[in-house]
Amino acid sequence: MYKNTSFNKFFCYSLILFLYIQTLASSTAQFHFPYQLDNPYEKHLLPIELREISGIVSIDSVQIACVQDEWGMVFIYNLKKKSVTDTHRFDSIGDFEGIAYNGLSLFVLRSDGRLTEWENFHPQHPKGNILHHTFSLLTSDNEGLCFDIVSNRLLMASKNKPHSSGKKNERIIYAININHRPLKSEVIFRIIDASIGKSASSFGIKQQEKSHKNNSFHFRPSGIAIHPISKHLYIISASDYLLAVFRRNGELLFIKKLNPDIFPKAEGITFLDDGTMLISNEGKKEEGNILTFRYN
């Protein structure tokens, strides 16, 4: 009996697409995004030394550790005093992009993937050893770093595509088990920014404006953090003015467009234990800043 294989393939593809859309709609319908991104609770203007702020992490409810693009130095910013209270050097110069803290050690990510570990870090009197770890990564430009308390590991996000890969729209999330020595990285999931672009319409996000080189999304993670209550993964993309929320298995839950007037260049993200979200913006002609958002 003759079978219309073309029709069968079309039907299968259509069914798969329909089920994917239904699954996405079901997941996102249950997700409540708990922040008003157009209404920061506070705006902290930073000194000129942090105009190129690239990463932030909360040390406690008041102190934030910051790094910037060019100097191997940790800046301690006090939210109550609204000023930098301490600085600590860990290296000379380099492209430092991410920072994480596990309650004991501080970790700083250089864009080429080198990881600095400052053992027994104290925001006022750090006295622990400073170690540098290198990895064999699939990517050369990496910006996001955070500590995942659930699995006691670091998560690292690539900003560019893998080496020798034709998949230009693929971004990798790595995990690093800090209890294993020497430290090793493993790929835990991959983000396909084209799929984010396809899903964007369901979140009310239009394709990029004509001012961009083309009309496709180029999701390029600049900061990542684990939410302290939901344990979801929050990733910001400065170049696309996007904030995306993922389940721990890489399933996309939510995307929100960032207002360029509020987020000129969102480079860092972290949370306080009560769910307060902080996002840092690199300055251009103006100062860099840290914005705080209440958890609702």
Image: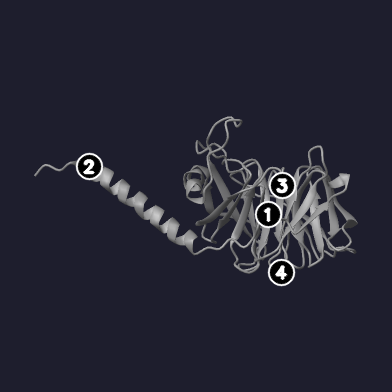
- Assess whether mark 2 and mark 4 are in contact (beta carbons under 8 angstroms): no
Q: Which residue is disc 3 drawn over?
A: 262
Amino acid type for the residue under numbered disc 4: Asp
Quarter occupied by residue 86: bottom right
Secondary element type, mark 3: loop
Q: Is residue 68 left or right of residue 255?
A: right
Q: Is residue 46 left or right of residue 166?
A: right
> For mark 3, does the 10 Å Cα neighbourhood hold few (<14), some (14 to 19), or many (20 or more) residues?
some
- Assess whether mark 3 and mark 2 are in contact (beta carbons under 8 angstroms): no
Q: Which one is closest to the eye, mark 2 or mark 1?
A: 2
Secondary element type, mark 2: helix
In which quadrant will I find the C terminus?
bottom right
Q: Which one is closest to the eye, mark 2 or mark 3?
A: 3
Amino acid type for the residue under numbered disc 2: Phe
Q: Residue at x 61, y 30 (%)?
A: 211
| Measured Cα–Cα span from mark 3 to mark 1 | 23 Å
Amino acid type for the residue under numbered disc 3: Ile
Q: Earlier in the sequence, mark 3 or mark 1?
A: 1
The percent coordinates of residue 263 (x first, y second) are: 71, 46
Q: Earlier in the sequence, mark 3 or mark 4?
A: 3
> For mark 1, does the 10 Å Cα neighbourhood hold few (<14), some (14 to 19), or many (20 or more) residues?
many
- Pick the front one: 13 or 172: 13
Q: Which one is closest to the eye, mark 3 or mark 4?
A: 3
| Measured Cα–Cα span from mark 3 to mark 4 | 24 Å
Q: Earlier in the sequence, mark 4 or mark 2?
A: 2
- Assess whether mark 1 and mark 2 are in contact (beta carbons under 8 angstroms): no
Q: Earlier in the sequence, mark 4 or mark 1?
A: 1
Q: Which residue is disc 1 drawn over?
A: 145
Amino acid type for the residue under numbered disc 1: Leu
Disc number for residue 7: 2
Q: Which residue is disc 4 drawn over?
A: 273
Secondary element type, mark 1: strand
